[in-house]
Each structure stands twice: as structure tokens, then as C-alpha cells.
Image (cartoon, grey):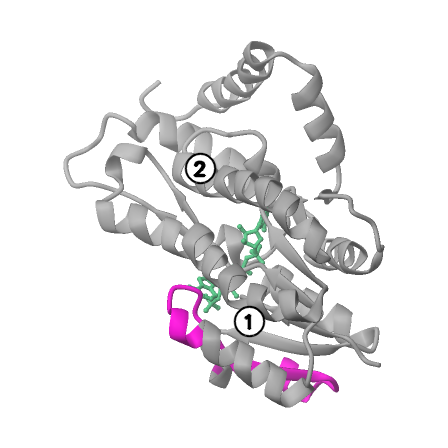
Amino acid sequence: MKKTVLITGASSGIGKASALYFAQRGWNVAATMRRPELETELQQQQGIRLFSLDVTQPESIEKALADTLAHFGRLDVVVNNAGYAIKGAFEAASPEQIQRQFDTNVFGLMQVVRAVLPYFRQQGQGTIINVASVGGRLTFPLYSLYHSTKWAVEGFSESLQYELAPLGIRIKIIEPGPIKTDFYDRSQDLVTKEGLTAYTPYQQAVLPLMDKVAARAEGPEVVAKTIYSAATDGKSRLRYASGRGTAALLLMRRLLSTTLFMGMVRRVAERGRKQGMPNQ
Ligand SMILES: NC(=O)c1ccc[n+]([C@@H]2O[C@H](COP(=O)([O-])OP(=O)(O)OC[C@H]3O[C@@H](n4cnc5c(N)ncnc54)[C@H](OP(=O)(O)O)[C@@H]3O)[C@@H](O)[C@H]2O)c1
């Protein structure tokens, strides 16, 4: 029997690449997104059906799940992929911006898990794949809010897998490194606050380094592949690094002391400052 996967944030990047990857391997795909009416490419693919789902709207999660079950008759895997990043100095972020970052990346993901659990329990099986980030295990400057959401996803997923394993439900965490998608463009919200200039020189030096990394990054297909392996390998493995150099970076983070690792990050940021950034 054909298996079914539901993916959040399938309008672009990793979510869209995953929708195509699963469909090409004969899966039914519920490609969910905030505005399915704007999506044209996935519409035409066999096995893919678009559903409206905003992770910050619990009723839309319930409806998308019900519609998926009504249309495909079953659900085997859920991929919690929707997310975006706030970047910039923490002090510049408003309470609303902080709330929205957590509403999307953490509480939205939890709502999807809450909605699907009764169904997976009844079925006695199911796999929940949470797209965290390499940034859920280590940190870079000026992404404190984004990192804190991804660290939350890591902790949530790691603890949750204990209570779900006896019920036949698996949790998987995907940890992509830098991947070339809309993430470095429209899915990043640079926070600013009128009159707050104390962080400007540091920001001007450090943020372009991230853009450079993004420019050299691989496309989202590599993560789609990792997500597919996590969905199909039949293992109880929890974490899957994804992307060039990601596993090595995580290994380095594990082997080095926090002081050494943070010193390394600081030195890279410092290099950015020395490369002729203003006010230095
Ligand atoms: N790219 C990277 O380097 C990288 C690295 C590590 C982890 N990740 C993670 O990978 C995931 C996917 O990112 P991406 O790189 O594929 O970026 P992307 O192309 O910008 O995709 C982000 C997706 O999230 C959706 N989204 C945002 N808010 C949503 C909401 N409230 N409800 C439903 N969908 C929402 C966006 O939908 P709209 O089209 O409606 O905006 C879009 O489909 C994110 O969780 C991100 O944190 C990315």
C-alpha cells in the first residue's frame, strides 16, 4: 500500500524539495503551506495534493490533517519543516517578534505533533520528523532567537521520543547545515530598533559572513534525501545531520570544549571585522 507523508512549509526550499522527492518514490504527499493558491509546480505532480496549513493556526492544522486522511485514507509520516529566522541583536527584537519566532518554530511544531499523536497512537505506528538545524546544537552570533527555537526543538524531540517509542511512534531530528533556499532571503527577519546603533558595527561585520556561507551552500535536495532516509530506514536513530561538512562540524563541537569552540566562532567573527568593515 502507498504510504502518505504530510509536510509543513512545502511552498519552497527543503519542504518543496521533500514533497517532490517523496512523490518521485511513489508516496502520497500532503504538501501543506500557508497559501496553496500560489503554488503551481507541485499542483501538477502525481501523488501530491496541496492543503492549506499555517502552523500558527491550530484549526488549520486540524483541518489539513482531516483533509489528508479523507483524501489519502492514511498517514505514515509527518515532516515538521515550516520555519524562519530572526537575525540581528536580541535587544532590537520586539516582544511580538520574539513571540512570532517561537509561535512558528516551536509552538506551531508542537501543535502539529499534538494533532497527529491521537491518530498515530490509534494506528500503533507513525514517524514524526522535526527539521531542527545544526543551529540547534551550536550557536553563531546574532541569531539568539532562532537558535533558542531550534535548541527547543532538539530538547522537545529528544525527550518526547522516550514516551512515544513504546507506542510504536518514532521521532527523528534533521539537522541541516547551510542550505541554499529562501531561508537566507525572505525567511530571515532582520530586527532593528530606532535609535539603537550600539550593535551596528558588529552586525555589519558579522552578518555578511552568513551570506557568504549561504552563497556557497548546497541546494535543498540533499536535505530532502536525508528526510527520506529518516522516514524509511526503519531505525530508531534520533538525529540526522544533513549537508556538506555538517556532521564534521557537529563532531568538532562535541570534541572541543565550549570555550575552545566559542573562541573559534569569535575569531571568525573578528576576521569579518578586520576585512574593512566600517567604524572599526
Ligand atoms: N536553509 C538553511 O540553511 C537551513 C538550515 C538549517 C535548518 N533550516 C530549517 O529548514 C526549514 C525550512 O527552511 P528552508 O531553508 O527550506 O527555507 P524556506 O525556503 O524559506 O522555507 C520556509 C518554509 O516555511 C514556511 N513557513 C513559515 N512560516 C510558516 C507558518 N506560520 N506556517 C506554515 N508554513 C510557514 C514558508 O512558507 P511561506 O511560503 O508561506 O512563507 C516556507 O514554505 C526551516 O525550519 C529552517 O529553520 C534551514
What is the x, y in percent for residue 189? 37, 50
Mark 1, other Cα within 10 Å: few <14 / some 14–19 / many ≥20: many
257 left or right of 84 in image: right
What is the x, y in percent for residue 158? 61, 40
Q: Quadrant of the N terminus?
A: bottom right
Q: CA distance from mark 2 to mark 1?
A: 24 Å
What is the x, y in percent for residue 66? 54, 82
Q: Nearer the viewer, residue 46 or 125?
A: 125
Count of numbered tags: 2
What is the x, y in percent for residue 270? 48, 18
What residue range appears in magenta? 38-60
78 lies above or below 265: below
Q: Nearer the viewer, residue 245 or 202?
A: 245
In this view, the mark in front (2 or 1): 2
Q: Residue at x 75, y 34 (%)?
A: 247
Q: Secondary structure at mark 2?
A: helix
- Determine the residue located farthest toward the left in the rendered image: 195
Q: Secondary structure at mark 1?
A: loop
Give the labeled residue for mark 2: 148
The kind of residue tagged 2 is Ser
Give the labeled residue for mark 1: 11
> Within 8 Å of ligand 1, the CB of disc 1?
yes
Q: Residue at x 25, y 38 (%)?
A: 92
